[in-house]
């Protein structure tokens, strides 16, 4: 199984985007919510689970942007289950990490 991963660098804090590979390139809309996985925001590099775990250890990021059932499951220990959204059955969550001082 593969995921698509992209790091967006920002002065406010880097964003790590992880999505189920099969969802990238698709668009989902429901009740005023939209997930546009066809945008460049989601288009990154294909990675397997081990590669993602290594990236998480070495990358500096403040926000996790997670889309897809497998992705949510992979990061389940990081996510407040109450904050998981569903758009046309596609799971999505954003996790804001506290910076350690």
Image: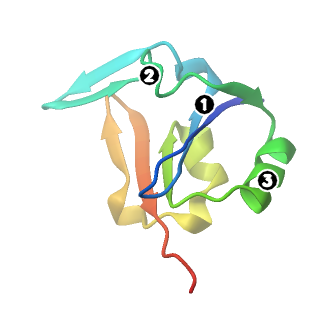
Task: Check the picture and name the quadrant holding the N terminus.
Answer: top right
Q: Quadrant of residue 26?
A: top left
Residue for badge 3: 53
First along the sequence among labels 1 and 3 = 1
Using the numbered discs, state the Cα–Cα distance from disc 1 to disc 3 in whole angstroms: 15 Å
Residue farthest to the front? Answer: 11
First along the sequence among labels 2 and 3 = 2
Which mark's residue is nearer the viewer, 1 or 3?
Answer: 3
Q: Position of residue 15 (x, y in %)?
A: 51, 48
First along the sequence among labels 1 and 2 = 1
* One can see residue 30 in this view: yes
Residue at image location 48% in from the left, 57% down from the top: 13
Residue at image location 41% in from the left, 58% down from the top: 12
Closer-to-camera residue (40/73): 40
- Cβ–Cβ under 8 Å for marks 1 and 3: no
Residue for badge 1: 20
Q: Which mark is residue 40?
A: none
Q: Which mark is residue 37?
A: 2
Q: Position of residue 100 (x, y in %)?
A: 57, 82
**Colour treatment of the image:** rainbow
Q: Position of residue 53 (x, y in %)?
A: 79, 53
Using the numbered discs, state the Cα–Cα distance from disc 2 to disc 3 in whole angstroms: 22 Å
- Residue 39's place in the image compared with 94, above or below, is above
Residue at image location 71% in from the left, 26% down from the top: 45
- Cβ–Cβ under 8 Å for marks 2 and 3: no
Which type of secondary structure does the marked residue at label 3 adopt?
Answer: helix
Which type of secondary structure does the marked residue at label 2 adopt?
Answer: loop
Q: Is residue 34 left or right of residue 65?
A: left
Q: Is residue 53 left or right of residue 44?
A: right
Residue at image location 53% in from the left, 19% down from the top: 24
């Amino acid at each position: 199984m593969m995921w698509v991963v992209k790091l967006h660098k920002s002065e406010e804090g880097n964003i790590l985007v992880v999505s189920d590979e099969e969802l990238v390139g698709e668009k989902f809309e429901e009740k005023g919510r939209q997930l546009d996985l066809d945008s460049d925001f989601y288009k990154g590099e294909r990675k397997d689970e081990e590669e993602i775990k290594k990236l998480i250890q070495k990358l500096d990021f403040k926000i996790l942007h997670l889309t897809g059932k497998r992705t949510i499951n992979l990061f389940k220990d990081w996510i407040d289950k109450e904050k998981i959204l569903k758009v046309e059955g596609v799971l999505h969550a954003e996790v804001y990490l506290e910076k350690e001082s």
